[in-house]
Structures are given as structure tokens and as C-alpha cells.
Amino acid sequence: MSDYPKNNFSYGPGGQVPLLTAEKVGTEEFIVNMGPQHPSTHGVCRLLLKMDGEVIPYTDRIDYVSAMFCNHGFCMAVEKLAEIEVPERAEYIRVIMDELNRIASHLIWLGTFALDLGAITPFLYCFREREMILDLFEMTCGQRMTFNYMRAGGVSRDLPEGFISKAKEFVKYFKPRVDEYEAILTENPIFLGRTKGVGILDKKTAIDYSVTGPNLRATGLKWDLRKEEPYSVYDRFEFDIPTGTKSDTWDRYIVRVQEMRQANRIVEQALESIPEGEIKTKTKPVFKPPQGEAYVRIESTRGEMGFYIVSEGEKTMPYRAKLRTASFSNLAALPEMTRGWKIADLVVIFASLDVIMPDVDR
Amino acid sequence: MFELDNVFKAVYFWLEGLFTRWGIPQFWLDLLSMLLIFAVIIAFISVSALFLVWWERKVSAHMQVRFGPMRTGWHGWRQTIIDAIKLIMKEDIVPAKVDKVVFVIAPIVVFVSALMVYVCIPFGRGLIVKDLNIGILYILAITTFTVVGLLMAGWGSNNKWSLLGGLRSAAQIVSYEVPLTLSVLGVVLLTQSLSMVEIVKSQVHFWDWYIIRQPIGFLVYITAAIAEVNRTPFDIPEAEQELVAGYSTEYSGMKFAMFFFAEFTNLFTISAVSTTLFLGGWHGPWLPSWMWFFIKTFSVILVIMWFRWTYPRIRVDQLMGFAWKFLLPLAFLNLILTGLFA
């Protein structure tokens, strides 16, 4: 954060033009891309430091594109600390929400990625479907992006009437849509030329930089926390972990596209088998977790998201809360991938990492 | 059948009658008719550019599950007219540190070179300003002038992004000029004439069209032509993710409008030339010849727009590699094959 000048708006088109050294160009493009998101980074900083007196901290804005995961992770950490059992229905709802959010987030990624390549149409296709998911979220918790939906012990409210049928409709509708995105991009020779072999991140470097999520799976390593150490009710569903082979930009693209299909599959299964019952274990209104510490990690859209909480057992707020977010580590590997490529490639490689600024700098 | 050239002929003969009755020399009649034709062409270009902007917005919108402009008139048809009026009425800003002369002349050079091509485009049977016997050569030569204008704009703006954009444009247009010319040569070989009218006259029937007899030539031409007018997937000079707005970054108001007009005029030009060279020009059954010409031209434009809203952009080095390593050999091959079998 300290690297930024005080007036963040001095960058961008027509602003400061840095010298054309490799590093400087990198920095500049980075800000051009991320400029619009930058003001929100500040908001996140304030919000997170302010975690006072509330049992449910406002975790949504860590990764505002897939906020359900932040909710989920933090709640799991608190539950682990306080040994709260989560009702089965709540777990199912969480999984449905997580996976829908994964699709929504990957859709944003796909759209903006194509936009950085100069293809404008996929962006609007993606937002058409994302809108439907956001409608589902709005139905459930009244919010479209920063949900604040999950609570320690369950979720804040039950699925509304008609949600299941509407979600099933979406699942059915979404399957052929993925083929549509693939038809416009996957085999397109220009797209292949721009992404095949570009920005290779080999398996060893990826592990060294602790890159996770789709970026790691694109290197061919089958590592997904939903399979490796299943949390929630993920062990009950059937799904595959798509992996890449060449660990280039195209692989990162295809892994995410396949993940959308798999997420859709999970949602479909969860909607079929969701049980009736409680949605929240009763907790006291003023809730003090017992003394101790807990660390949980979940597979968010962007990779491994870890929550570490230390409680003194006396106050409602944690003594210490540390987050491990995927974007931070993923972004750190950018120099390794971009060395020797052109500016136009840098934009594409950077986009292919799927980094969200508040997720990098909490 | 209603042929447009009859209208022009009627006007000309009426004027001639007036002039002879009043005893005015032939020179003034020629001058007046030239001015009239020029006015008609300017009007035609303005209207078609405005229409194309609107059409592009509608086509892109419908490809992207949107509607595009809807508020101003029926399906927003007045939108581009309003935009044009806005651009004309804007303050004419010349930034402080630009090279004033070059900065001001650049859009004029680009626009005039786009305009001059229309001298020998056959819009219909007998509907051509001047059937030059070197027609296609003239068109290829004139369109190259655009490079000068773009370089002037990039240099004169005194802005790094503009200069980069201008340089990219120049490199791109000069590179693609070569396969473009070679692909046209195949048609010229078969016709044994450089005149646009002669080229059209040699493709009366559908099976005579050069798209059938010169398929490789057509593909090379259309690819190189899209690159010539800097459209996706070859719109690298204007890659906003990399270069802000390229050579036109510093321009506003009427000067920007001239670049914009020239862009869409050039789009019409390449479509019209490809119609003339490869798609049989004005030939077609039932409808008047000029109508056939426009139907074909706008179909080509539609396809080019379709490319734009489907494809990603290619990289600078890939662009050059594509021109020199793929298109050029292919154009040569086409020329050799044509020479062998014609």
C-alpha cells in the first residue's frame, strides 16, 4: 500500500507515463487495469481493522466477487473454535451458495479476460448469466455482491420459496451456455495464438510461490481442498477436478471453464438432495468463543483461503485474526511468468491469474 | 428498371441545354458538373458513414444480447446524427505542446485520402465519376496516403501513446499493402485491365465472379483489407487495453470526427472494392444495378463487423508474422497459379 502515491487517481490514461523499462511497464499496466478497483481497497482496509464488537465481522469485501467464500471460511473458523455443530440443511445451502458464487466469479473472470484480449462479446454473454445468479442471491439474502449471509452455526435465513425451482432452472439453462463461451473462444486460432504457451508457470515455481486454486491446477497438480480435505458436505457430491497440462494461459482458461461445469454439477446434486431441517444452531446473541485458536482453509474461487483466529475467551472479538488469501500469493508469481513477454501479453497473463485487489491487500 | 445514372444524365443534359441557350462556354459547365458531383459524393459519404456508425452499434448490440441506441427515434436512428452535431459544435481544442501545423493537417490528410478513392468506384452501370484506365492502381495508391496522415497525427500530438499508435498503424498498413496488392494482381491478370469498369464487365454471370475463380485471392484481399483499415482482429493501433486510443488520443471535436468519418469511409471503400473485384460488382438479376452493388457491399461490411464482435485481437509481432510469413507467400502462390492456368 505504501508504494502508491497519495493521490491514487493521478494514474490511468493520460496520467503519468513511466519510462519503458520492464519493471516500470509492469507496474503501470497493473495500475491501469486495477485502477477502478483501487478505491475499494481502501474501504476494505478500514473495514477489516474496525472489527470491533461484532460477532459476525464483515468479511464480504475481502473478495467482493466471491464473498460467499469469505463468509464461509470465517464462520467455519469460529465454529471450529467454539465447537458448534452446523445443521445439515445449512451445510447444503452453504455448498449451493459457494458453488453458485464460484460460477459467478469465474464468469466475471472469463468476461474481463476476453475483454483484455480485445474480444468484447463474451463479456456481455458472461454478465447475462451472472445476472441470473445474482438474482438468486438477492432472493436469498437481499444482497447481490456483499452477502453477509452465513452465520456461525448456519446461515442467516432459509432459502426462500421458489428458490429451488428457480435454481434448478438456472442449472439446466447454464449447461449449454458454457458450450457457447467455448465455441467463441476455445478453438479460435487468434485466441490460441494469444494464450497457448504464453506465461508459463511451471509446477515447481507455482508450489514455491504457494500459488493455489485454478492457477495451480493448470500446472497439472490435482490439488483441491474440496477433495483433499473435504469440508462442509463436499464429500457427498460427485465432481471432477479439472487440471491443465502445459501450465500456460490457455490452460488456466480451460481449467476455469471446466470448473464452471463442475460447480454446476455440484449445485445440481445439492439441489436434488437438500434435506429439510434447521438452518442454524442457536447461539447466544452476544457470543464469546472459548479460549483457543483455530485455523481452517477452504477452496475459494481463486484458491486456498485460510482463516486463523485466536480468542482469549473473554471478549466478543477475536484477539487475533489472520487471513491467508489466494490472490496475494498468486500475484507474487506474476514476475516469474511475465519475464520476456510483451506488454500486450502482460495484460493477458495478469488477467489470467484472476486476481482481486482487496484479496491481495486486505 | 430504375437506373440512377439516368438521373445524372438528365440533370447534365438539362444544364447543357441551359448553358448553350445562354451562351456560356463549355468550361463553366464542366466546372459546375464537377462541383455537383463532388457535392453528391461528400453527401453520400457523410450519410453512409453516419449510417454505418449506427449500423455497427446495432449489429454489435444484437450480437451481444443488447439493443444498442433505442431512445432517439425509431431504434435510435437519429443517434449518430446527434453525435455528429455534438462533435461539430464542440470546442476545437489544440493542446499546448503539439506541433500545430502537423496536428491540424493530419486529420485532413486522412479524410481526403479516404475521399479521393470514390472517384473510380463503380456504384452501378454507368455510375462512376471517372473510369480511369488505371482505376485499381489509383485506388491502391490513394489509400496508402492514410499512413502519412496517421504518422502525422501520432508525431504531431507530442504524446507517447499517440506516437506508438501512429507507428503501429504505419508498420501495419505498409506491411499489409504488399499482400493486398498481390491479391488484386490475380484479378487484373484475368481481366487484362486495370479499369474498374472493365473488371466488373468481365464477371457477368455468377460463375464468372472472381470469388469463384480467385478464392485464395479473395481471402487474402479481405484479410489484408481489414488490416488496412485497422479493424479487429487487427485493431492494434487502437488497442485501448494497451495504448489508450492510439493516434487519435489527443484529438477532439471536429478533428476527431474526421478520423472517425475516415475510418468508416475506408470500411465502405474496402467493401466496395471487394464487391467490384470479386463479387461481380453491379451484376445481378431483377434489381437495378446500383441496388445490387449496395446489397453486396453491405453484406461484406456486415461480415467485417461480425469479425470485429467475435474475435480477440492479435499481438503486434503475430500481426507482422502473419503478413510476411503467411499472407505474402499465399498471395504469391495465388499469383503464380493464376499465371499458370489463366
Image (spheres, coloured by chain):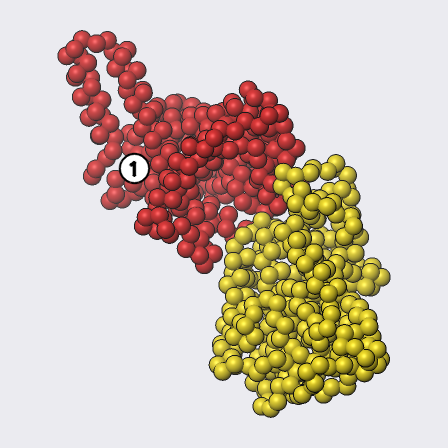
Q: Residue furthest left?
A: B21
**In the rendered view, does B154 fall on the left or right side of B192?**
right
**In the rendered view, does A246 fall on the left or right side of A36?**
right
Residue depicted at x 41% and y 40%: B83
Q: Quadrant of residue B195?
A: top left
Residue B274 vertical position relative to residue A336 in the rendered view, above or below: above
Q: Which residue is more in the foreground, B328 or B222?
A: B222
Amino acid at circle 1 = Trp
Residue depicted at x 52% and y 29%: B93
**In the rendered view, does A251 fall on the left or right side of A111?**
right
Q: Which structural element holds mark 1?
A: helix
Residue bearing the label numbered 1? B290
Q: Which residue is more in the foreground, A255 or B89?
A: B89
Q: Quadrant of residue A108?
A: bottom right
- Visual hue assigned to chain B: red
Q: Position of residue B25 (x, y in %)?
A: 23, 9
Residue B229 vertical position relative to residue A250 in the rendered view, above or below: above
- Visual hue assigned to chain A: yellow
Q: Can residue B334 be seen at all in this image of the molecule? A: no
Q: Position of residue A37 (x, y in %)?
A: 65, 54
Q: Which residue is more in the foreground, A83 or A267?
A: A83
Q: Position of residue B199 (x, y in %)?
A: 38, 32
